[in-house]
Image (cartoon, helix red, strand yellow):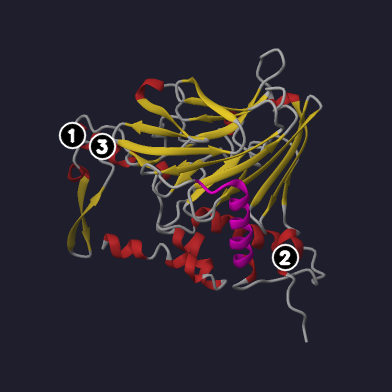
Amino acid sequence: FAQPIDRKALVERHKVVVEKFDSLTSLTVGNGEFAFTVDATGLQTFPEFYEKGICLGTQSQWGWHSFSNLKNYRLEESYKEYDFHGRKIKYLSQLKEPAHAKESGDYFRVNPHRLHLGCIGLELINSDGSKVKMSDISNIHEVLNPWNGEIHSTFLIKGKPVEVATYCHQNKDMVAAKVHSPLIKEGLLKINFRFPYPTGGHVDSGCDWNHPGKHGSRLTLIPAGAIISRSLDTTVYYAKIEWSGKATIREKAKHYFVLSPSKNQDEITFSCLFSPGKPVAKNPGFIETAQNNHEVWKKYWTTGGAVDFSGSTDERAPELERRIILSQYLLRIQCAGSVPPQETGLTCNSWYGKFHLEMHWWHEAHFALWNHIEFLEKSMAWYKKIL
C-alpha cells in the first residue's frame, strides 16, 4: 500500500527565506479577516522602502473609512440608464457631465476605502542618538514557516544580534511578537506604533503621513498596556497594546508612540489588538498566540486534500508543488474572510481596497476543491445580505 503523505515535511520544504531588504519580498501573517505584512526585520520597521513594491499593510475586513461628504453627494446622481435586452436598467457609472454628477461618481468610487490600521516597527537607535538605517543591518535571515504561521527573523545591527518572532492570532485581529537582543539593555531597541491618515488612492499602501491634523490618536494607559483610540472623520477604531515585563509607552510625536522596555532585560513580548469597538478583554499573550497558530495551522494542513510531488522525476515538479503550498497559505490568510476577497487581499489598496466578485473564482473556489469548504462558506452569506 502507498504510504500516507508526510504533510509536515511537504509544507515545511516550502518555507520562504528572505536574506536582504527587497521591496518585493515582504512576508505576511494573517487569518482571513486580518493580515499583517512585514519587512526583513519581522515587523514594519521600514515601510517607506516597500511603498512601491509589496507594501507593509495592516488591514482588516471591518476597517473602512470615508472622507467627509461636504457637498452632500447622493449615490443616485451617478446612475446612468442602459438598455439591457429590452429593459431599462440603471447602473452606477463614471459620468463625465454634468460636473456635479462627475464629482458625485468620483466621490463614491473612492469612498469607502479600506484602512491601513497602523504600522508596528522596531525603533532602532545608534549610540549617538541617530536612527539606524537599513544599510546598518546585516546577516539577515528571515523565515516564514507556513506549517505554524510564524515569521522568524534574525539579523545584526553593527555586530549586535536581534531576533524577532511574529504571529497573527488566528481568531482575533491581533499581532503578537517576541523581540530578543542585547540592544534592549542598552536602550537602543524599542517598539514603535505609527498611525497614518488614508490616502484614498486607487492603488497604494493607503498611508498618508503628511496630514497629521486630519485625524486623532489618543493614548490611554492601562495595567501593563495601553489603548490608542483612533478617530478619522466619522470613523473610530482602537489599538490595544499589552506587553510582558517592565516597559513604558509614550507619545513621541503626533500619531507616533514608542514602547520602551526596561534596560534590565534583553527581551520583550507584546501584542496589539485592532478593534472597531473599545476592547475590554485581556489580549492573548505571545505564548498563547503561538500555541493558537500551531494548533490551527496543523489542522489546516492535515485535513482536506494534499498532493506530494517528491517522487516525480519531472524537473517542473518542485516548482509546481511550491506554488500549490504557498498559494494555499496566501489565500488562507488573505482571502478566507467574511466578505468576498479583494484583488490584492489584505495587503494594499488596489481599487481602493474594494473586493471584486470575480475574485471568488480566482481566490476562493479552490477551497472547495481541496475540501476546505468552510473557508469558502464564510463569505457566501454576503450574497444573501445584499440581495
Mostly what secondary structure, the magenta segment? helix
Contact? badges 2 and 3 (CB < 8 Å): no
Q: Amino acid at mark 3?
A: Lys
Residue count near mark 1 (Cα–Cα under 10 Å), binned few <14, some 14–19, many ≥20: few
Q: Which residue is mark 1?
A: 72
Return the x and y of residue 359 as percentages of the image width and height: 46, 58
Image coordinates for residue 263, horizontal then vertical, percent: 68, 25
Question: On the rendered structure, is 170 left or right of 262?
Answer: left
| Location of residue 50 in the rendering, given as x and y in whole percent from the top left corner | 59, 34
In whole angstroms, how far apart are the C-alphas of marks 1 and 3? 19 Å
- Return the disc, 1 or 3, that comes first in the chain's sequence: 1
Q: How many circles with numbers are drawn on the protein?
A: 3
Q: Which residue has dot 3 on it? A: 96
Q: Which residue is mark 2?
A: 8
Q: Give the magenta-colored segment's residue range.
A: 283-300
Mark with earlier residue (2, 3):
2
Q: Residue at the location (57% across, 71% down)? A: 370
Asked if residue 275 is positioned above or below residue 254 in the image, the reply reads below
Count residues near mark 2 (Cα–Cα under 10 Å), then give few for <14, some for 14-19, many for 20+.
Answer: some
Say whether residue 345 is visible: no
Q: Is residue 288 magenta?
A: yes
